[in-house]
Image (cartoon, helix red, strand yellow):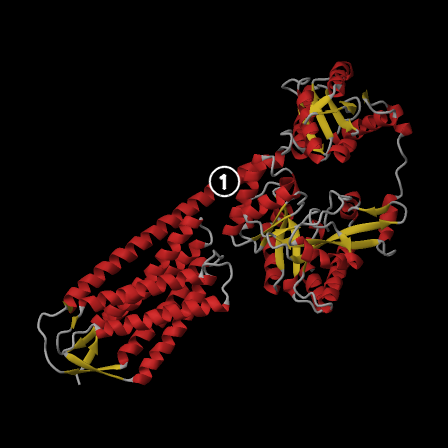
Amino acid sequence: MLDVSWDPVLIGISFVVAFIASFIALDSAGKVAISSRRESTFWRLSGGATLGMGIWSMHFIGMLAMKMSMPINYHFPLTAFSFFIALVSATLAISIAIAGKTLSNKRLIVATGLLSTGVVAMHYVGMAAIIEHAAITWDFSLILLSVIIAVGASGVGLWLAFHLRQNTRRVLINRLIAAFIMALAIASMHYTGMGAATFTHVGHTHHEGISALELSIWVSAITLVILGIMLVISMVDSQLRTSRLADNLHQLNSQLEHQAHFDSLTGLANRAQIDACLQACLQHSKLHQRHFALVFIDLDRFKVVNDTWGHHIGDQLLIASTQRIYTCLDDTMTLARLGGDEFILLIPDCNSEAISPLLTRIANVIKEPFTLFERTIRVSLSAGSSIYPEHGTTLHELKVKADMAMYHVKQAGRNGWAVYTPEMEAIADTPPTFLQELSQALERNQFELWYQPKYTAGEHTLTGFEALLRWHHPERGILLPAEFLPALEETGLIIPVGTWALQQACCQLNQWKLQGHTEWTLAINLSPTQFEQHDIVDIVSNALTLYQLSPTQLTLELTESTALKNLKRSAEVLNAFSALGITISIDDFGTGYSNILMLKSLPARELKIDRIFVKDISENSKNTKIVSTIIDIAHAMNMCVVAEGIETQEQETLLTQMGCGVLQGFLFARPLPAHRIHELIPIENTVKAKPIVQPLSHRHSITL
């Protein structure tokens, strides 16, 4: 029996080689999910090849670490064949394991069998490559142990390769730890297999095969070249991806900043932008003692156009009306769209006499018939104006007076304009007892939760619901949040109503669970006032405990402006929710000045694209680009993307192709009260073939 000693330096080098190869293989696998088809094929093949080459190099470096009292030569064809075995088995196994979105047990078993067979075959073919001047006696118990280790190492390695194939928040640390585990397992298998062999000197063959020195040169050269090339390619690719992501973030933030100040449909200034212009004009007029006019404009019978011809025609009418109004303005005037068919016009250096001919021209151009998509459409406008400083010295006063003048025109039969006069206040409606009714609505059990279903894109599987607040008014019927939510916020009633809504949602979710729908989730919106409660985490946690719900079934939605208002506190509260297992969703994304870099610091796992982007995504290329970029960046941050307001098949198709994960909207189903949710169960089976179109009785719904 020959005495065998081991070189600790070469043993350490063999482990480092296995570690680097494992890390590169995991890094390559991680790029598959975020690459194009051609690129993903390259990363699958290169990752598998790198792992196979690393295992082979580690084996022969380990062989070189074994020192005996006689020279060792290696049979070249068998040595090359062992390299081929490692390369092919690792490439096939990696490709099978990370080919799909999920790793089934069958695919894991097949891939593990391929890789472990390849590793064992490579090892013992490599051992057989030793020129037979030494007889080898085998310990079959250690051989069996090495096979078991190979199977375990292969299974763990492939499982890690699959589950680390997407970016996570601790991607580098996770891959380093995973690579260390894989390298340790590979080294354990190799040295266990080496320990199974006992060498006995039987003769000496001179100058046959490859000497240990030649093998060391070949192994070193192949290892350094391939690992070096792959490491450089991976680093360059990561740098390019980081650069592209930074460019996309900058571009998206610029687009969203523009979106925050300008209307996406007409390109006009929006409410926030016109308020800034009004404030600047007010300060300038006070300082220089100038007049200016504020005009509210509303298109008459616009709702009839929408209901008769569809919202697409209505949108084109808004664009055409904007263009006509612009022909009457000069560069000093600012026109803004407040929403729907409501506009506001700021006219500097203007008094009551000067405004009359301008409003007459605007009214006349709007009265001319519009030709849209071979249809002739006639509308008119109602406009009301107030003048600074005659009618008020604050923006609030001027807005109230202009709105009152416009309401006066509408009461008089529309199709005209008026400048505010004090007499108009006498015919204004008496303020209703709205706030008193609202304050009593909760104790009178007039609030209800309705539920809008959410479906997985492509498969159309019912995955859960979003809870929507409704006020069942005894006289006016079902009221949407737009009609009472601002009053709830202003009066502070949102706190008890919000707590009631949370408990009611959890109660309903528990009932669904008892009915067997354990896979359904429920999303509920947290208002800004609710989120600022010091004990909001306890309130939510107690509701879950009361109804024995898993936190993973609950999704809390909050707007991006709420999340970014106080970033430090938001991070603390949301981390507490995330630690419980609750999913955090950023709602109405893109409607304000979105800072994705700041959102990245929050533990949000879901991003919800607002309906204003979805509405005209198929016609507005700018919105299409924004949505596509949002989805790409959200995926890069390992966030699920939900789109709301889906109303057409074309919108669904586009969003599905872009990679949106969950869809909701009237194309699939409108919100329903709890006692009607059972109607969706047969619909779920039908919707997989063709979405169910529900009547669009409530086009805009605001969540609580």
Q: Where is residue 679 drawn, in percent x and y?
A: 76, 57
Residue at mark 1: 250
**Eyeballing the image, is 383 above or below 450?**
above
The structure residue drawn at horizontal position 72% and vertical position 28%, both measured from the top left corner, is: 343
Q: Where is residue 444 drawn, in percent x and y?
A: 88, 55
Please indicate, yes or no, whether residue 247 appears anywhere in the rendered image: yes
Residue type for callout 1: His
The structure residue drawn at horizontal position 61% and vertical position 63%, both measured from the top left corner, is: 581
Please indicate, yes or no, whether residue 257 appears anywhere in the rendered image: no
Q: Quarter-wise, where is residue 646 in the image?
A: top right
Dot 1 surroundings within 10 Å: few (below 14), some, or many (20 or more)?
some
The structure residue drawn at horizontal position 89% and vertical position 34%, both measured from the top left corner, is: 429
Q: Quarter-wise, where is residue 645 in the image?
A: top right
**Quarter in which the N terminus is drawn:** bottom left
Q: Which of 135 and 699 is in front in this view?
A: 135
Q: Which of 115 and 615 is in front in this view?
A: 115
In screen coordinates, is 576 left or right of 184? right
Q: Where is residue 562 drawn, in percent x and y?
A: 65, 48
